Image (cartoon, rainbow, N blue to C red):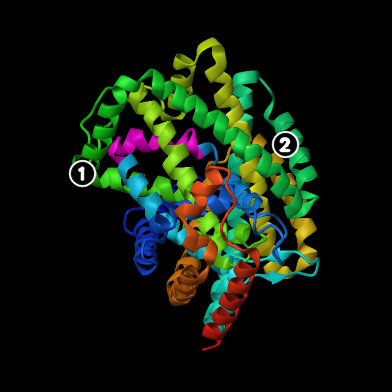
Amino acid sequence: MEAFQTFLNQISAILWGPFFLVPLLLGTGVYLTIRLNLVQVRQFWSAFRLAFFDRSDEDSPGGDISQFQALATALAATVGVGNIVGIASVIAFGGPGAIFWMWITGLVGMASKYSEAFLGVRFRTVDEAGECSGGPQYYLAKGIPNRFGALLSILFSIFAAIAAFGIGNMVQANAIAVNLTQELGIAPLTTGIVLALAIGLVLIGGINSIGRVTSLLVPFMVLLYVGSCLAIIGMNGHALPAALTMIVQDAFTGTGAIGGFAGSTMLMALQYGVARSLASNESGMGSGGIAAAAARTAHPVRQGMVSMTQTFIDTLIVLTCTSLVLITTGVWERDIEAGVMTATAFNEWLPGGFGHWVVIIGIVLYAFSTILGWAYYGERCMERLLGRRAVMPYRAVWCGVVVVGAALPLEMAWAIMDIMNSLMVLPNLVGLVILAPLVVRETRHYLANDPYLRAGVDEIEQFMDGQPGHIDDNDALDSLAKIRDADAESSEN
């Protein structure tokens, strides 16, 4: 059994190493960034306006939940325990310079996330229960209408449905159980049963229930955690300029051994930074397109822009805040186990035991929301493979596995799911590259004709000043209708 575990670890290390998935994911992000002419930069403010201020799409036909609820569901699945604990391991092995490469990867990953969400909406379908379903399991088959596309679709569905039980279920449940056992003395089995019941109550209502819960949990947990991080960074503001300088310099030079830190080279900084960023925001993995497909939106471009803000929030905000806490407080230089670095910083710098509770609440809420988000991803893949009849059994099994994950050691399960997780990425990356011309063509046409997005910064300033917009709704609807007709004609040709 030990030999088999070692074999699995070696396979996982190769797949997620610097010569396979990491360059493939990063390379795809760079390729899409170039093809889309830096859409994540040029449309940055328009994307945030659509995500958090503009509600004009709420009455759009199609979709089951609002654009914000779809964004919250995707954020729930990606902003997890890794944002609190995982980033400490990145700094421990890759050095502060890994944070720089994490930023770069997050920026180019926004283009991958945009493309996945665009395609998720563009090729979504309605299942037997009247719910929208989309993502790689559909856009690979519909966008590449041949046997190869069908094969990619089926492979993605199989790998994602299995991988969901690891990355989005057992690992998260185990993190909650271990944390509550260590901090509050609650038995893992008790945690697993209570957690499974809570998850089951939410899943009964489907995506509408998941969307409502995540849209409440995600803003609260992000604001609580990020606010606490900013408070600690503020207390150590004198160390911030040096921390930022160190991050940039070490990205190209590596870091020598300091305290309990092993030291790193530039290659290690690059590898760990890229891998952590991709594992956290899931850009290129295809999962974001599944959540986006459920959104009520006037056009795929609009939801693509909303969805790409998820990568920015996850990587450029949450992960960055954790990183700066560890570096400005000097915790990363001490001989402390990576798994408790963040908790140590919070406990030492936030008064009255508040930091202790922020970490406990953060881990519980982050992991709980991740389980909800990935439950939806998994059931949509099972629906693609076996039809609607497979959804309820999948949900029941999902809740049972939550108990297993909370109560049992997961070293072997983690390795197996890591491999499944990497395998689900491959068919999606192939599809993104093949379908890139379609995404580029329809994106360019839409951005040139949508009056809302052409208004850009002026509209944002009017909104912030409380002034009415200058766009006539009838003109906007006419424009959107023309865009959809032109997109359909372009696709046929």
Q: Which residue corresponds to mark 2?
A: 195
Q: Report which quarter residue 332 is drawn in.
A: top left
Question: Are the residues tagged 1 and 2 within 8 Å (C-beta)?
Answer: no
- Residue 88 painted magenta: yes
Q: Crowding at label 1, few (<14), some or many (≥20) Cα neighbours within 10 Å? A: some
Taking the image as shown, residue 456 lies to the left or right of residue 253, namely right
Q: Kindly identify which numbered label has been placed on residue 224.
A: none
Question: Residue drawn 55% across and 47% down?
Answer: 463
Q: Nearer the viewer, residue 465 or 116?
A: 465
**Disc 1 residue type (three-letter):** Phe
Taking the image as shown, residue 479 lies to the left or right of residue 110, namely right
CA separation, marks 1 and 2? 44 Å
x then y, percent, for residue 326: 38, 27
Taking the image as shown, residue 289 lies to the left or right of residue 347, namely right
**Visible in this render: residue 8?**
no
SS class of the residue under badge 1? Answer: helix
Q: Report which quarter residue 320 is drawn in.
A: top left
Question: Residue drawn 46% across and 71% down?
Answer: 448
Question: Residue drawn 34% across and 24% down?
Answer: 328
When the figure is inspected, residue 348 is found, relative to residue 200, above or below; the finding is above
Pick whichever of labels 1 and 2 is earlier in the sequence: 2
**Disc 2 residue type (three-letter):** Leu
Q: Main secondary structure of the magenta part?
A: helix
Q: Which residue corresponds to mark 1?
A: 252
**Visible in this render: residue 283?**
yes
Q: Please report the bounds of the magenta region as a residue range.
A: 82-98
x then y, percent, for residue 77: 59, 47
x then y, percent, for residue 412: 54, 45
Furthest toward the left, the residue is 253
